Image: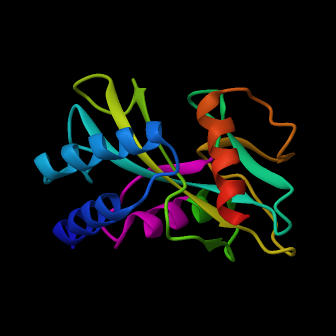
Amino acid sequence: MSSDLHAASLDLLSTWQAPTSDQQALRKEYVEFVRNHPDSHLRTCYPAHLTASALVLSHDHREVLLMLHAKAQMWFQMGGHLESQDRSLPDAALREATEESGIHDLSIDPTPVHVDRHQVGFCHPEGPVDHLDVRFVAVASAQSNASACDESGDLWWFPVDALPTDEPSITDLVEAALRRLG
C-alpha cells in the first residue's frame, strides 16, 4: 500500500494545475522531491516529507474551523502526517480533518487548493524537517458539531473575513479555498 500512496501522490502533484505562478513553482519542487524520494510520503523521510491538510469551511462558506495547535500554540487548519491506511493525499487530509475536528460528515474536494512548505522542529529525531503540505478544502454540513482532540488545544469557528491570524499560509489558504468553491 505504501508504494501505492507514493504513486498516487506523485500522480496528483504532477497533474494538478496550481492557481498562481508561486504555487506552480512550489508544486514543481514537490514533484521533483517526490520523484527522487520513494519514501517521501513517510514521516521518516528526511530532510522533508509530504503532509496533507484540509481547511474546514461551514456549509455556507462563511466560517472556517481552525484549531489551536497544542505544541505550536498557533491557529491552523487540520492536517498532519500520512498514514499507512491512506490511499491518497485527499484521503489523508480527510482522515486528519475528521480526527482533529470530530466532524464525521465532511465533504472533501479531491483537488488541492494550495501547497505550503514549512519547517517543523519537533517531528523528526534528526532535527528540523520540512513539511511539504498539500492542502484541500472540506465542507461541513449544517448539522456538524466540532469537538477538540488531544492534538488541538481548542477548536473555533471564525468568520472567513475575521481570522485570528494574519499568517500568510493561513490567509492565502482561506482565499484559495473560497476561490475554489466559487
Is 82 magenta? The answer is yes
Report the number of numbered marks.
0
Q: In the picture shown, does residue 44 fall above or below 10? A: above
> Viewed as shown, does residue 101 lie left or right of 30?
right
Residue depicted at 72% across the width and 55% down the height:
178
Residue 33 drawn at (x, y percent): 21, 43
> Viewed as shown, does residue 145 lie left or right of 149?
right
> Viewed as shown, does residue 109 lie left or right of 10?
right
Front residue (pair 157, 145):
157
Residue depicted at 22% across the width and 62% down the height:
6
Q: In the picture shown, does residue 130 fall above or below 144? A: above
Residue 144 drawn at (x, y percent): 81, 71
Front residue (pair 144, 169):
169
Residues in magenta, as a range: 77-96
Quarter occupied by residue 129: top left
Q: Residue farthest to the front?
A: 21
Residue depicted at 73% across the width and 64% down the height:
182
Residue 92 drawn at (x, y percent): 44, 63
Q: In the picture shown, does residue 110 fall above or below 43? A: below
